Every structure is written in structure tokens, then in C-alpha cells.
Image (cartoon, coloured by chain):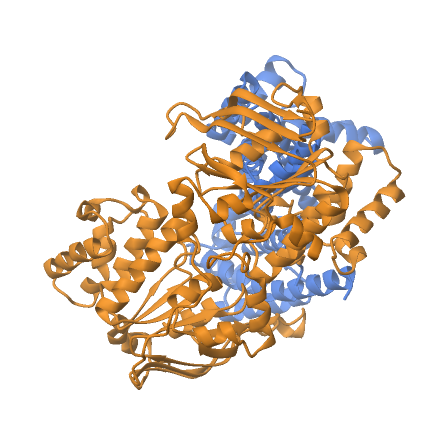
Amino acid sequence: MTENLLQIDNLFIELPAGSERQYAVQDLSLELAPGETLCVVGESGSGKSLTARAVMGLLPAPHVRVSDGQINFNGEDVTMATYDRLRDIRGSEISMIFQEPMTALNPVMSIGSQIDEIFRYHVSMSRSKRLERAIELLRDVNLPNPDQIMNAYPHELSGGQRQRSMIAMALALKPQILIADEPTTALDVTTQAQILKLIRDMQTASNTGVLFITHDFGVVADIADRVVVMQHGLVVESGTVNQVLNLPQHPYTQALISAVPSLMPRKARSRSEKTVLQVRGLNKTFGGGKSFFGLGKPNREVRAVKNVELDLHKGETLGVVGESGSGKSTLARCIIRLMDTDSGEIRIDGNEINSLSRAEMRPWRNKIQMVFQDPFASLNPRVRVGDIIAQGPVTLGIEKDEAIKRARELISIVGLDTRAFDRFPHEFSGGQRQRIGIARSLALKPEILIADEPVSALDVSIQAQILELLDEIRDQMNLSMLFITHDLRVAAQVCDRLAVMRYGEIVETGATAELFANPQHSYSRDLLAAVPGKEWKAGSKPKSAKSKRKSA
Amino acid sequence: MTQSTKIIRYVSRRVFQGVPIIIAIIVINFFLLNLAEGDAVDVLAGEAGSATPEYMAQLRAKFGLDQPLPVQLLVYLKNVLALDLGYSFRHDMPVSDLIFDRFFATGLLMTCTILLAVGFGVLLGLLAAMQLNTWKDAVITVFALITYATPLFWVGLMMIVVFSLKLGWLPTSGMENVAAFYEGWDRAKDIAVHLILPTITLSLFYLALYTRMMRASMLEQYGQDYVVTARAKGLTERRITFVHVLRNALLPVVTMAGVQVGALIGGSVIVESVFAWPGLGMLAFESLFARDLNLLLGIFMLSSILVIVVNLIVDIIYCFLDPRIEVS
């Protein structure tokens, strides 16, 4: 019993009356030993985050509470602990890192003072000693110039640096347990790989037990010793990483794992010689306005898109991959003329459209349409689904009855019930909303579809369905698609050709299979190397995380 | 570039930008005021009871009122650039002397009002948010609602009735007891006693506003992710409220306070009338009826300068409160 750092027995977390279900977490039991990494995997709403919060006594009181069960930390039941005892435990014996390091840090306090607080409230140390320790911590998490970062504010750091600072904070007092709630979800793949390695190194150094919450099986394959799979608040399966990933027993686990897109690129389809979209020498710069009377510094200039050249052939899917800030979304918006460019040419079927005015552009709008990333933000919440879809054709002069008929058809094409026509967007789940978004973009019968991260806000099983839908529609309507994504697994499954973007430039283009097998540019190689769980899948059994650690 | 040189550059740029704004305000006010029927001579003649047209024309020539409007404007602008605000024939004094004399009274009233309203508003809002859904929260919210909905002049009159007439604790009006000829400390004490009622009256409305804003802002900040982080770090609730949440919650209140300084000058007209406070508001009110355009233009110019300066100060305070905002 006491050999486990953390032992949760039959935990029930009750939701307030009138919620979707009575318990957020039901009859959950798990244990965590020192030096072990336990991954809790599940889709959104599975109760994995609330489990983590419950261990820290951080449930959003008084509405959500532990109604039954025990959480034993070193044999002490933390659900019974007093407030003062809990405060002692938090940050010193159990600490936590979060998904979004920008919002998890106080924006108006320097990193140094946010680290310093932990020492001030848990141990008595002199001021100079605390300062010394804080700088040491920042050095330990491999941050450059720790002295500078002490005085920096969160907004002055990059996402990865912020998460490193969070980790420094969490490890300040060498906790026995580190709870990591999706710590790399908001980060780029290369940064994610670095953060995962950092957590692993820290864990080995001080034999910390890590409770790692994630939805990403690639990450699980890379770091987990044992895995717990949750669905709707219930544990459906648990076991070692080998068992769960390679011999999943429960149908839900099996479905989840088979929904993870494989890194094996699919076969490229034969491509037509006809080019539908041609981009030449496209440039876009942000900022750089003139300063007033020469006083004040001139604004910073960001060159978001630099000299981009693209060719999209009839019926093919061209993937644009890159990390955040690489300019891929800006490129998409420039091509569809939602943004004005500085220079360059965009040709649709050989016709230059970049120099057209707003009015001249209108007849071209139906040729090229876009599916947006966030299905929650991109649909007007006050407009009925049917109108959202029919609005486009109606503005372009199609008869209202005709447009409505077409909208109903599209709703069933994208796999929704036709009753959806009269409902509002908020009545649908994320995946369903993305289907509405796709229906909307198809209403104008476009030849070219630009999909800007269409699945990155979705759970993995929904993601698979949407990708399948996009595939079907593309074949049915002979669409040419520009597919923007940061996820190389998705790109491998969807794209015929890839263009890798960094700092606004396309560094490499090539057929997906070739680029995966033999990347030419060093950045493409880095990107591919950083994909989590790349050794797993395709039948090969992952080595257990522990042995991997030893070999590293 | 260091922080201080950045701020100096920023301030000088803002001052530069302020000059065309003030000139525009003068020009617009000049034409607006001249749209109204009648001039100072009409009023003087009316009060004198009998004045021949010849005498009136003579007066107009003396005041320069017989010139075409654009010429009058140019003359006025030229004088302003030479820091000469003209002469008030009504008061028989240079406008600048008159304004600066009264400016002290209004400045005192406004400063006290803002300090009281922001200070107590923040305090009450903080208290209400910390004691959310208890009787204290309810009392504060209801108090804020009532003061927010009560007209200023009525509050002023009731205050006089209760505290001056019935209880006799405080003076009814004026800024000091002129007949007493106090000097030094005694004078300051006398002014302070006279200041109490007008300040409270004028600040009540703003106090309610800031209380409500602060409470909402605190509650919003309590829901942010960094508060969960702070709790997960094992900090005390005191530390979380007073260090983490408070500073973030103050930002919108400071912005609002800066915007409302302009409105405060307008609001002070009513309070200054009720309490016979010898400030700019009263002066503006009187000079409007006397058609004393020189004086009015002077007051308008002073208040626009005041608004520009206060906004600049607020922006600089904001930079210190919120490191995300850079002076540039």
C-alpha cells in the first residue's frame, strides 16, 4: 500500500444537479509509483482533467466535489485534508503544469517573482538564496539567459519558454508527484519533443511520479509506463503501455487507437497535368507603419509570407505544413483574398485575381472556398444552420428556393440529419459544426477548397471522421484542395504533395511519400523527427518507456 | 533604449499631438459659440437699461466685435499662441487671471472627488467580490445601485438639509469663511470643512460606477487560469486576491477613471451651483449667460488641456500596471 505514491480508490466526482451526467468521474481507481509515468488518456469530456484537479483539491468548489472514494497520497487521504494541509501539499509535494502556459501564468508579474512565491510560501529562505535557487531552476530547464528571464513577463517569452518556466516553477521544491495536464497540446511538435524530454529528464533525476494527462496516443507511446483510458468518466482500460497500445481489449480503446492517423504516407494518386491554382512571388508584411514626426520607434515589421510559389493541380491535395508562426494561415488568407498582399500573383485557371478589386473579385469567390480551424468561432451563433449554408449562393444571385434545396442536400452529404437545417450552431458538437462549415464552403460549388487546420480542434475519433468526409467529397466533386496543418500524421493521410513552411518561406516541396522517406531540408528532417510516437504503430511494438530512457 | 528615455520620447510625442487637437477645439468652439444669438454688448446694454445704438456700436468697436468672424478668430488664435487669453469685460480682469484663480477651486474638488471615488470604489468592489453572495455583497450592490440612480443635484440638496441645516455640522456653501480672514493652517482647515459635502456629492455617482466595475472585474479575473495555477502553487487566498487578482482587476478601472475626468468637469457645474463653490464650472455657467465669449473659450481650452494631460498620465500609469502595454 505505502509503496505507491498515489493511490486513488473508487473515486466519484459529482457534477452539479442539471448537468449532462451525474458524475464527472465514476468509480475511478489508479495508482502511481515513484519514478513512474502514468498516462491518463481520453477525449474531451472524459473527466481526465477533473481527476487531476481532485488530487490537488482544486475542483471548482462548491459545485463540483468528490462525493465518494479516497485519494491516498503517501497513505494520507487528501480528500479529508484540511485547507492548510492541502496548501502545504500543493506546489511542494504535488505540483501541476497546465495546457496553455500563456493563460496559466499571471500576465502582470515577472517570471522571477512567480517562481519566488513558491519558496516564500513553503520554505523559509533568505531573499538572496531564493533568487539564486530560482536562477538555478531556470538554468535546469535549459532556458537561455536565466538572469534575463527572471525579469521577463510571460508575453515576452515563446510558448516553449513559458512552458519551461512553468515546469521550473512546478519542480522548484522537488515534488514527489508532478501532474501534467496536456502540457504540450498548445505547443509545436519540435517544442513538444523538447518539453517531453525535459519532463523525462527531470523525472529520472529525482524519481518523481508523473501523472500525465493527454489525448494524444503518440505522446503516450513516447513517455508512458502505464496507461489508463477514460471514457465518459469511467476507466475503460488500464495496463502497461505495451498492453494498451498494441493489444487493446476494450472496443473504445481499439477505436481510439485505430483513429490515430498513421505516419505511413498513403499512395499518391495520379495527378492531372492541369494547374488550377498558381501562386507566384507572393509577399505579405505586417506592421511597419510610419512613426509620428519621427518621434517614437518605427513599428516592428513581420514578413509573414516571403516569395511563396505554389502550384495546385486539378484534383490533388497539397498540404502546407509548418509550425505556428510559419505564415501558413496568412498564406491561405492571402490566396482567398481575405487579406491584401504586398506583391505577387495568384492565378485561378490562368486568370490573375490578386489585382482585382472587391467588386471584380466577386464572380471569382465561388471558385475558391475555405474551411476554418475553429468550428465554434467560425459559425455565426445567431443564424440558423440552413441560412448559414444558403447565404453564400443567395448573395451570388441564386434563387432562394434553389439555394435552400441545395443546402438541404449538402446537410445530408456531410452526414448530418436534415432536421439540422432549422437549428442553431450551438446545438451541435465540435465535429458536427465542422461538418456544417464544410457544407457551407461546398454550397458555392467551389473548384478549390482551402482547409485551414480543419481538424486540429477536434478529438481524434471525430478527426478521423472529418478527414474521411473531406476525402469522399474531394473525390465526388473533383475538388482541388490546399490543406493547411501542423500535424504530420494528418498530412500523411490526406495530402498527395507537401510544402513545408518556415518563417514565411516554403523550404521544401515534394510528393508526401518521398518527403517522408527522404526529407531534403534540415527543417523538414527536424519536423519529422519530432513527431511523437513515431516508433510506435504499423505493427511494431514500442519498447517500454523505461528501457528507452536507459538507452537514451 | 532605456525605460526613462522611452517615456520621455512618448510624452513629447503625445504633447506634440495634443497641439493640433487643442487648436481644433478652439476653432470649433469659437464658431459654435458665435452661432448663438446676441453678444456681450447686447447683455451689457440690456442690463444698463438704456443704451443708444451709437453707444453699442462704439462698445463693439472697442471689443473688436465689429470685425468679421474669421478675422476675430485669427486675432484670438494669434493671442493664444502668445499665451494671451484676452480680457473679460464682464469681470474687468484678464481671462487668464480669472481662470487660474478659479482653477484652484475646481482642481481641488476634482482631485478629491477622483481619489475618493476610485479609492472607495475599488475598496467596496474588492470587498463585494471577496464576500460574494453574502449579505455584505448584497448591501454594497444595492448601495451602488441606489447612488448610481440618484440625481446629483438632489443628493447635494439633501446633504445640505441633513448635515448643514438639521445637524449643523458642516457649512452650507462656499469654499471658505471669507469673513473670518483665516491664515495658514486655519485657512486650510476651513477649506477642508467646506470641501466635504461637495466632494461626497460629486463622487457618489462615480463611486457607484467604480464599485460595480471593480466587482465585475475581480470576478472575471478569479475565473482565469492563472488563479488555478496560483492555487496549485499552494499560495494563500490572501496572496492570490491581493497580489495576483487585484492588479489585473484594476486595469479596466484605471482606464475608465481616465476617460471620465472630462465628464467630471461637466458634472461639477451642477455641484458647484448647488454648493456655491467658486470653481470653473460656476464661472462657465455665468459667462455663458453674460455672452462672455473670451472667458468661455479660455475655460474650454483649459479643460481640453486638462483632459489631454490626464489621459497622458493615465496611459503612463497603465504602462506600469500592465507590462504588456509598451510606451511607443
Work out whether residue B115 can be spotted. no
| Rendered colour, chain B | blue
> What's the residue at 54%, 69% (across, down)?
A326
Work out whether residue B10 can be spotted. yes
Residue B139 drawn at (x, y percent)? 53, 19
Q: Is A333 above or below relative to A455?
A: below
The N terminus of chain B lies in which quarter of the figure?
bottom right
Task: Decide if residue A441 is on the left or right side of residue B295.
Answer: left
> What's the residue at 51%, 48% (across, down)?
B288
Q: Is A281 above or below relative to A82?
A: below
Corner quadrant of residue B78: bottom right
**Foreground residue among B168 and A14:** A14
> What's the residue at 72%, 51% (across, down)?
A201
Task: Decide if residue A372 is on the left or right side of residue B199.
Answer: left
Report the residue that reaches farthest toward the top.
Answer: B166
Residue A383 drawn at (x, y percent)? 27, 49
> What's the residue at 52%, 50% (across, down)?
B44
Residue B292 drawn at (x, y percent)? 55, 52
Task: Decide if residue A221 is on the left or right side of residue B310.
Answer: left
The C terminus of chain B lies in which quarter of the figure?
bottom right
Chain letter, orange: A
**Foreground residue among B316 and A393:** A393
**Foreground residue among A204 and B323:** A204
Q: Is A1 above or below relative to B312?
A: above
